[in-house]
Structure formats: structure tokens, C-alpha cells
């Protein structure tokens, strides 16, 4: 495996610095405002994926990887028995804690690429994370998901389709080498992060080949989501 540790550290640093402005992307504010029609389509698809998560019914003990500012933790907390929200950044977890404030949520700072799971769970959830896993760590990441699950445990994930209007108006969706890409903060600081867009049918095939019963679908223009079990 190529040494990608510097890139991954930069990725953690980017999300630490971006923490206070992260939600602008999700709520289509500032540099992410793509106009009324595109924003409305985005928010409609967000609602559709949130409904898919509710239908998936993560009712048990859930672990959420790369939990971020709590945009999905809040739904998991309301649906599930308990949630362990894992993220590498304390600054991000503080925002998550403030948003979710659930008695059934535990917040845990850990680096997903260097973490031994403490126990097993009924469901593993991750949103907008798989695209930040370098191709050389794809296998290890799915082994981690397996190690986190009870034998009949299930996963659910959400991700981005390769749609130009997903990102800010002042940055390119993809990098030159299609793995590392430049991302900018509102104040202009620039970071290199990992960005790998997964094509839904190919990703489903990759998971089936690795022994997962998996379904990967799209919400239309902006998102993919998938669920499955061993
Ligand atoms: C694109 S955000 C997704 C956040 C959240 N899942 C959401 O959908 O709103 C990626 C998150 O991964 C976290 N992160 C980055 N590298 C990480 C690592 N190595 N281990 C754990 N978390 C990491 C960042 O702090 C950030 O909160």
C-alpha cells in the first residue's frame, strides 16, 4: 500500500478546520447554494434518503463511523436503542453533542484507520465517508465493518454521486488523479483530501464479491445509499 498517512492526516485536519462551516454544504448555504431549483431537488433527495434510513429501521445498538456534526446521528438516536458516534475530531464531536444531546448516545474520538473496535453492534452506519477511504484501504475498511457487526448485523451507508453541483461553486468535483482532490474553506485555506466516487452497480458488485448481501441504490441526482449484511 502506498504511504497515504500524510494525505489521511491532512483529511482529518481539513474536517477539523471545516467543523464550524460543515453544515453549509448539507443545507446548501453560502458557496454551496446552487439556486432555488437545485437546492430544492437536493433537499428533496435528502428527505428521501432519510426516509430510506427510517425504513431500514436501525433499532438496535448502532455504531456510526465518521459521525460528523450529527446530521445523521440525530436520526439514529431517535430510531435506535443506542448510538456510539465515532469521529477523529473532538471539534466535530462537540458540535454533534450539542445538536443531538441524546441520553442514548456516546461520543468517541478515534481514527477509523487505526482503531480496534471495542465490541460488536447490531448496525453500522456511515454517511459521506466511503468516498474518503483510499482504494488501497477499501478491503480493510469493509473488514472493519464486518468486525463491528454481530453475525446477523447490518450496515447502512449514504454517499455522494459524482454530480458537479454537489460541491462548492468555487471548486472542482474531482482531482486530477481522481483520488486526491483539493478542498477549500470559506477563508480560502486549501487542503488535499481523498475523494473516490463509487458507481452504484459496481460498488454493489464489489460488495457481493466480498460476501456481503448488499443493495446499492441512488436517490436520483445527488446521493447513493446502500445496505446489507454478511
Ligand atoms: C464528510 S464528513 C461526514 C460527516 C457525517 N457523517 C455527515 O454525513 O454529516 C467526514 C467526517 O469524517 C471525519 N474523519 C475524517 N478522517 C477520519 C478518520 N481517519 N477517522 C475518523 N473520522 C474521520 C471528519 O472529522 C468528518 O467529520
Image: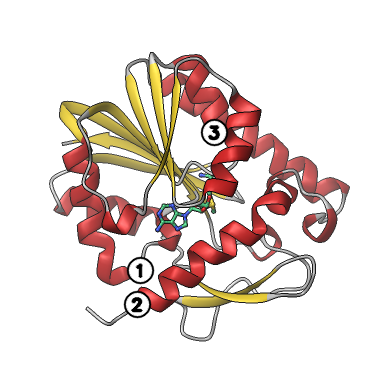
Question: Is residue 123 placed above or below 65 in the rendered structure?
Answer: above
Q: CA distance from mark 1 to mark 2?
A: 8 Å
Q: Position of residue 2 (x, y in %)?
A: 27, 82
Q: Mark 3 vs mark 1: which is more N-terminal? A: 3
Q: Are marks 1 and 2 in contact (CB under 8 Å)?
A: yes
Residue 71 visible at all: no
Query: Which quadrant is the C terminus positioned in?
Result: top left
Q: Position of residue 56 (x, y in %)?
A: 40, 23
Give the residue drawn at x 16%, y 28%.
150
- The tag on residue 124 is none
Per the image, the residue denoted by label 3 is 72
Q: Position of residue 105 (x, y in %)?
A: 46, 23
Per the image, the residue denoted by label 1 is 134
Question: Is residue 55 placed above or below 26 in the rendered structure?
Answer: above
Q: Mark 2 vs mark 3: which is more N-terminal? A: 2
Badge 2 marks a residue whose secondary structure is loop
Per the image, the residue denoted by label 2 is 4
Foreground: disc 2 or disc 3: 2
Q: Residues within 10 Å of mark 2 (few under 14, many from 20)?
A: few
Query: Which quadrant is the N terminus positioned in?
Result: bottom left
Amino acid at each position: 500500500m502506498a504511504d497515504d498517512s500524510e494525505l489521511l492526516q491532512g483529511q482529518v485536519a481539513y474536517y477539523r478546520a471545516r467543523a464550524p462551516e460543515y453544515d453549509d454544504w448539507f443545507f446548501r448555504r453560502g458557496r454551496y447554494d446552487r439556486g432555488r431549483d437545485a437546492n430544492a431537488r437536493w433537499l428533496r433527495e435528502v428527505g428521501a434518503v432519510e426516509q430510506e434510513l427510517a425504513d431500514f429501521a436501525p433499532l438496535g445498538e448502532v455504531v456510526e463511523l465518521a459521525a460528523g456534526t450529527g446530521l445523521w446521528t440525530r436520526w439514529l438516536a431517535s430510531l435506535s436503542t443506542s448510538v456510539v458516534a465515532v469521529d477523529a475530531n473532538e471539534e466535530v464531536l462537540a458540535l454533534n453533542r450539542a445538536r443531538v444531546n441524546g441520553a442514548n448516545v456516546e461520543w468517541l474520538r478515534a481514527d477509523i484507520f487505526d482503531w480496534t473496535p471495542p465490541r460488536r453492534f447490531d448496525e453500522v452506519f456511515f454517511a459521506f465517508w466511503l468516498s474518503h477511504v483510499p482504494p488501497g484501504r477499501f478491503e480493510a475498511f469493509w473488514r472493519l465493518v464486518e468486525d463491528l457487526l454481530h453475525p446477523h448485523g447490518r450496515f447502512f451507508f449514504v454517499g455522494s454521486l459524482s454530480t458537479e453541483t454537489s460541491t462548492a461553486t468555487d471548486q472542482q468535483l474531482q482531482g486530477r488523479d481522481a483520488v486526491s482532490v483539493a478542498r477549500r474553506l470559506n477563508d480560502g485555506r486549501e487542503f488535499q483530501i481523498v475523494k473516490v466516487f463509487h458507481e452504484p452497480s459496481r460498488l454493489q458488485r464489489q460488495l457481493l464479491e466480498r460476501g456481503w448481501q448488499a443493495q446499492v441504490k441512488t436517490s436520483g441526482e445527488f446521493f447513493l445509499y446502500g445496505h446489507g449484511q454478511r
